[in-house]
Image (cartoon, grey):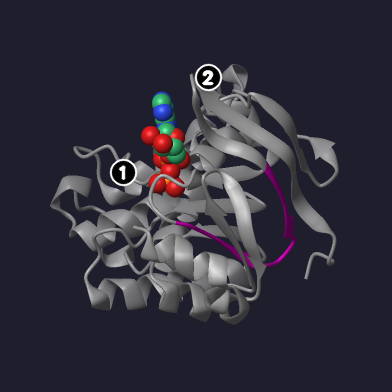
Amino acid sequence: GQGDGPLLVLSDLHRHFGGVKAVDGLSMQVRAGTIHGLIGPNGSGKSTVVNVISGLYTATSGGMSLRGSELPQGSLNRVARAGVARTFQNLQLFSELTALENVMVALKGVYRMPLPLVLLGFARAEERHAQADALALLELIGLKDQARAKAKDLTYGAQRFLEIARALARKPDLLILDEPAAGLAHPDVIQQIEIIRRVHARGVTIILIEHHMDVVSELCDQVTVLDGGKVIAEGAPDEVKRHPKVIEAYLGQ
Ligand code: ADP
Ligand code: MG
């Protein structure tokens, strides 16, 4: 693995929206090489945490570091370059582009061609490399056979898998999945578990937001439970499941 130090450290993180304390003094550590579950009832602040880590929102206060270096704030691009990728709770695909093109667009940030090389005709070779990379990612998610299908013509499950491939295009150290199983039929949930395992086996650390507790138990090494923007429990999946505060928070839904 990548050692057992923390990859991501959040310290007393706050994100307020007017009077709403969506994230209210959150501290947590994600160890390198783990699958870390982030769970909690609706409105407990999970997506806001992801939005702050990934640079979509700035924090109101608090610290975030990746491998001991301060994480840039408020810039999706700079956070991506630092090695963090995410998917969204709602799909963000280019529906008229093919599966392959969707991944290639995501790879654009990786393959940056200097203009002189393009003029000398080397762009084609670069394009071929990008295509090979994209096809490898489609294979990882089981969509290689549908590389030429438009995103809008893929099943909903396949579209969700494609989002994961797009997030992986930038070769992140940390991948954050915000409710990737939302709306999936059972067979697709099973396939998605397999995909997440394959991604993890490549050495990618994963934060998984997921409300199916059986999926969390199956995949996660460690779980942090949020309620009202605060941590109410932390530990192995089977421990937190039995925690009285966790049971109470979920019963209140
Ligand atoms: P979860 O993902 O756990 O369901 P969210 O992070 O989406 O929770 O929301 C936490 C709280 O923050 C909710 O009360 C929500 O209404 C509020 N919130 C989230 N995003 C915004 C926003 N952009 N503007 C105002 N309030 C927000
Ligand atoms: Mg959410």
Rendering quarter of residue 144: bottom left
Residue nearest the observer in this picture, 204 or 235:
235
Q: Is 124 on the left or on the right of 205, as rendered?
A: left
Q: Main secondary structure of the magenta part?
A: strand
Q: What stretch of residues is rendered in magenta?
A: 26-40
Residue 115 seen? yes
How packed is label 1: few (under 14 Cα within 10 Å), some, or many (20 or more)?
few
- Vertical position of residue 181 compared to residue 17: above or below: below
Q: Would you say the residues marked 1 and 2 are in contact, meaning their CB atoms lie under 8 Å apart? A: no
Picture coordinates of residue 79, whole percent (x, y): 64, 33
Q: Which residue is mark 1?
A: 90
Q: Verify whether residue 100 appears in magenta.
A: no
Describe the element under mark 1 as helix, strand or loop: loop
Which residue in the protein does label 2 denote? Answer: 119
Circle 2 residues within 10 Å: few <14, some 14–19, many ≥20: few
Which quadrant does ligand 1 occupy? Answer: top left
Number of numbered callouts drawn:
2
What element does badge 2 sit on?
Answer: helix
Task: Identify which amino acid the numbered label 2 is placed on.
Answer: Leu
Alpha-carbon distance for marks 1 and 2? 39 Å
Identify which residue, 179 or 127, lies in the foreground: 179
Q: Identify residue type, mark 1.
A: Asn
Q: What x and y, as percent, mark residue 217?
A: 51, 78
